[in-house]
């Protein structure tokens, strides 16, 4: 048995398909994403004024300044509040963006939310990137579907929490509920 368990191939060859996703060279542009760019589709974000948070692995030393979400086939309509936030793995708020209020969000459009304070990650692990949009029509997002956790210690890939949120992210992710739709998020 090796450090790779029962796997006997070359990990670089096995994971080579990920390089076809068109990601920039991490040496040239820092980024972390929760999903590869392949196999994505149109998924519902969350109801109006509800926080949708997705698991995002960050490494010690990463500096996260922005969170980018991409709308899919449905544009936002009559938007009143929209913000993104970064939470610790325990669900404590680390930083949030300013409220983008009624700024338009067209279909198939990336929207980058700058965090009020850049976050230097001091411990590698799972963090949560969150988005809340209050609108008559919340835009759908580019993402995929995920399975509910079944093993002890597994966390949700995507979850919802809170209600009636406007311009301010809650201090904690309280009573998260599993969400099958997993939006793509890119941290830079």
Image (cartoon, rainbow, N blue to C red):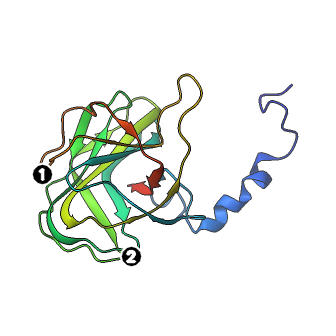
Which residue lies at the image location 46% right of the left edge and 53% below the top edge? 181
Q: Which of 78 and 31 is in front in this view?
A: 78
Residue 31 appearing in the image = no
Please state the total of marks drawn on the protein image. Answer: 2
Q: Where residue 62 appears, x then y in whole percent?
A: 41, 42
- Which of these two is toward me, 162 or 40? 162
Gap between marks 2 and 1 measured at Cα: 24 Å
Q: Residue 166 carries which label?
A: 1
Q: Is mark 1 on a helix, strand or loop?
A: loop
Q: Which residue is drawn at 78% across and 33% down?
A: 4
Label 2 Cα neighbours within 10 Å, binned few <14 / some 14-19 / many ≥20: some
Label 2, on which residue? 108
Task: Locate the C terminus and report the quarter of the image it occupies.
Answer: bottom left
Residue located 54% across and 64% down the image: 40
Q: What label does residue 5 carry, if any?
A: none
Instruction: Tell me: residue 149, above or below residue 64.
Output: above
Badge 1 density bin: few <14, some 14–19, many ≥20, Cα 10 Å: some
Residue 132 appears in the figure: yes
Q: Dot 2 lies on which element? A: loop
């Amino acid at each position: 048995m090796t450090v790779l368990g029962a796997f006997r191939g070359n990990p670089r060859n096995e994971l080579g398909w990920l390089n076809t996703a068109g990601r920039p060279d991490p040496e040239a542009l820092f980024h972390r994403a929760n999903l590869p760019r392949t196999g994505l589709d149109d998924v519902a974000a969350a109801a109006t004024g509800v926080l949708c948070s997705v698991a995002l692995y960050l490494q010690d030393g990463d500096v996260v300044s922005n969170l980018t979400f991409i709308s899919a086939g449905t544009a936002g309509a009559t938007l009143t509040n929209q913000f993104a936030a970064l939470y610790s793995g325990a669900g404590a708020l680390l930083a949030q963006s300013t409220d983008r209020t009624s700024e338009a969000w067209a279909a198939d459009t990336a929207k980058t939310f700058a965090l009020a304070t850049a976050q230097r990650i001091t411990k590698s692990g799972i963090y949560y990137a969150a988005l809340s949009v209050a609108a008559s029509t919340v835009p759908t997002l580019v993402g995929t579907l995920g399975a509910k956790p079944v093993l002890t210690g597994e966390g949700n890939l995507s979850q919802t929490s809170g209600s009636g949120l406007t311009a301010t992210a809650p201090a904690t992710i309280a009573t998260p509920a599993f969400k099958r739709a997993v939006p793509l998020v890119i941290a830079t």
